[in-house]
Image (spheres, grey):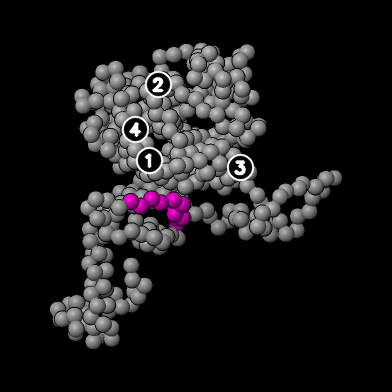
Amino acid sequence: MSQNQDLLNQLSQLLSWKKSKSFYAAKLNISESEVEELLKELKGDKEEENVEVTQKVNVEKGTLESTRESVFDPKTVEQLAKLHKIDLSKYKISNYWSKLKSNGKFTSSVFATLKKASNDYTPEDFAKFLKTWEPNIGYDFYYHEVGGELEKEEVDVELNIADFHLAKKTFQGDTLETKEFDYYRTVNSLISKITASYKIKKLVFPISNDFFHTDNVHNQTTAGTPQDVTAWYDEEYEKGFDILANAINFLVSQCEEMEVILVQGNHDKAKGFYVAHALEVFFKGYKKIKWQRQAARVKHTVVGNTFIGYHHGNACKLDGLPILFATSPESAKDFGNATYREVHTGDKHHYMAKEVTGSGVRIQQVPSLSGHDRYHVDNGFINQIRAALAFVYHPTQGKIAEFESRI
C-alpha cells in the first residue's frame, strides 16, 4: 500500500475529470509511472471493498476472529486492521496468518482481543511497583543472564492436536476454512506460550489421530461407518495436507530438531498413512525432521529421560497399555531404560489424566478441537471443552509444564 495517502485522495478526486495519465501527472507534479502505481492501488482498494469479510465475535471472551481474501499480502497491524475492518481503538491484533492462493490472491486470518479498560492494573503499573520493591526474606534468588536477558531453559516439547475431524459436519457450523483457522491459531497459541519461557530443543508432533473425518470415497470411516461431512474425500485430503504442511513448516523453525509421528485413528487409518507419506516426501530436504510413519497401531519416542507411548485409544483398555509398551519388542528397551513413562491417547474427545496404580505410568488422554456432530448429540457426548495440549519435558525431571489452547 502507498504511504502517500494525500496523493491517493487527490488522484481519486481528479478521476472524475476523465483525463489522461499525463494530465494527472502534471496536476500532481509526479511522473506517469507513479500515476500508474497510484491507479493500481486505487483499483485494489475498490476490489477490497467488494470482498466479504467473515468475522466471528465472542462477546463473553472478548475475542474477534476474521478471515478474508485480498489482492495484496498485509504486513503491518494497520494494514490488517483496515483490511479486516477492525477498530484498533477497541481491539488488539494478537495473531495472524496469511497465505498465497493459486488464483494469485491472499487469504489472511486475524485473531484479535478486546483491549482492557484503562482502570485495569497495567504492565506500567507493575513496573512502577518493582522500582520500589525490596525483598523481605532472609535469602536471595539467583539467576543466569545471557546478553542481558534471563537464560531460557532448554526443553523438549510435544504438541498434540488429536481428533481434529477436519470435514465433520458439526452443530457449530464448522467449515474447512474455519477449521483451518482454528488449527493455525492453536499451533501459534501453544508455541507462543512455550517460547515465552523456554527454548525448544526437540519438538514431537503426532499427526493423524483422526485428523481426517473420513477414510474413503464413500465418506465412511475405516470400519465403513457413514459420516455427515462438509466436503468430499478429495477436498478434505487436499485441505488437510495443506494445513499439516504449513504447520510443520512453521514448527520446524521453532526447534533444533523435530519428530513427526503417525498415530493412526479409527476414522482415517488409510488416509492418515497417505498424508504422512506425502508429507515426508514433501519435506525430504529437511534434515531436522525425523519421521515415524509406519503402519502400526502403536509408536513411541523418548524425550530426555521420559518414555512416551502413542495409541489412538480406541478398541482397548487404557490401563492395559503400559504392559503393552513394556513387553513389545519395539519399545521394551526404551520403556525399561526411562525414568518416567507416559502413554498418550485420544479418541474420546475429552481431557483425562491418570496414573495407573502400581505401574508409575501416567496416561494422558488428549481432548479434541472438534465440535459436536449428529452422533455425539444423539448419544449425549456433548459439552466437552474443545482444546489441544502441549507438554514440556525437562532433560532429567520429566514433564514440568502443560499448556492448553481452547476454542
Would you call the spot at circle 2 few (<14 residues within 10 Å), some (14-19), or many (20 or more)? few
Would you call the spot at circle 3 few (<14 residues within 10 Å), some (14-19), or many (20 or more)? some
- Nearest-to-viewer mark from 2 and 3: 2
Image quadrant where one finds the C terminus: top left
**Magenta span:** 90-99
Residue annotated with mark 4: 277
CB of mark 2 within 8 Å of CB of mark 3?
no
Task: Tell me, for residue 23, which label it has, or none.
Answer: none
Q: Is residue 98 magenta?
A: yes
Q: Secondary structure at mark 2?
A: loop
Q: Secondary structure at mark 4?
A: helix
Q: How far across and how far down the image is residue 390, in percent? A: 51, 35
CB of mark 4 within 8 Å of CB of mark 3?
no
In 3D space, how far apart are the residues under numbered discs 2 and 4 (Cα atoms)? Answer: 14 Å
Would you call the spot at circle 4 few (<14 residues within 10 Å), some (14-19), or many (20 or more)? some
Task: Tell me, for residue 284, which label it has, or none.
Answer: 1
Q: Is residue 62 above or below residue 212?
A: below
Residue 270 visible here = yes
Amino acid at pointer 2: Ala
Residue annotated with mark 3: 154
- Nearest-to-viewer mark from 1 and 4: 1
The answer to which of marks 2 and 3 sits earlier in the sequence is 3
- Nearest-to-viewer mark from 2 and 1: 1
Amino acid at pointer 4: His
Residue annotated with mark 2: 296
Amino acid at pointer 1: Lys
The answer to which of marks 4 and 3 sits earlier in the sequence is 3
Would you call the spot at circle 1 few (<14 residues within 10 Å), some (14-19), or many (20 or more)? few
127 displayed left or right of 115: right
Residue drawn at (33%, 77%) of the image: 6
